[in-house]
Image (spheres, grey):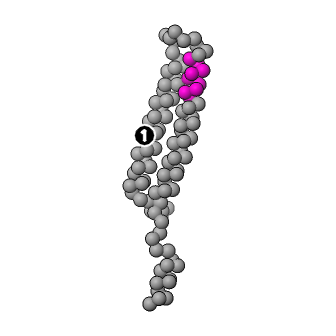
Amino acid sequence: MNGIKYDTEKLSKAGKGAVLRVVVAVYIAYLAFKIVSADNTSMSVTVSRIIGALFLAADIAFIIYTYNQFHKEMKAAVLANEATETDVEEEETDE
């Protein structure tokens, strides 16, 4: 891999959260499609298309949020080096 080490708990949490958010995003897109394509409804076609477009806009915003949140959680999951090279050199000079 690329040599970056991750905290396994945070990595798992980031992955699970992203998967759940993607499932919700797909469901919102499905609802938008069903609202737009509804033929047997008492709403006018124009109103149903407007509501469907609003659902689609909300879905796009949610997808952007999901992407940003995933990357934020992945950055938080990166393990910091516990002993940097300068710390190791300082310990060697003390002895």
Tell me: residue 2, above or below residue 92: above
Tell me: 21 left or right of 47: left
Instruction: State the residue lying farthest toward the front.
Output: 94
Q: Is residue 22 visible?
A: yes
Q: State which region is magenta.
A: 48-56
Up/down of 50 relative to 8, above or below = above
Residue 40 placed where, x, y %? 49, 10
58, above or below 64, in the image? above
- Residue shown at the point (57%, 36%) measured from the top left: 61
In percent of the image, x 44 and y 59: which residue is there? 6
* The residue positioned farthest toward the bottom in the image shown: 95
**Residue 1 appears in view:** no
Can you give x and y, in whole percent of width and height, for residue 67 in the image? 53, 44
Residue 67 highlighted magenta (yes or no): no
Quarter of the image where one finds residue 17: top left
Q: Quadrant of residue 56?
A: top right
Q: Quarter of the image containing the C terminus? A: bottom left
Residue nearer the viewer, 37 or 24: 24
Q: Main secondary structure of the magenta part?
A: helix
- The image position of residue 33, as x and y in percent, is 52, 23
Which type of secondary structure does the marked residue at label 1 adopt? helix
User: Looking at the picture, which amino acid does disc 1 mark?
Assistant: Leu
Q: Can you give x and y, in whole percent of width and height, for residue 19 in the image? A: 43, 42
For label 1, the crowd category at 10 Å Cα-Cα, with few meaning under 14, some 14 to 19 and many 20 or more, is few
Magenta stretch holds residue 49: yes
Q: Label 1, on which residue?
A: 20
For the point 50% across and 11% down, the residue is 41
The residue at the point 58 percent across, 26 percent down is 54
**Is 10 displayed left or right of 39 in the figure?**
left
Number of numbered discs overlaid on the protein picture? 1
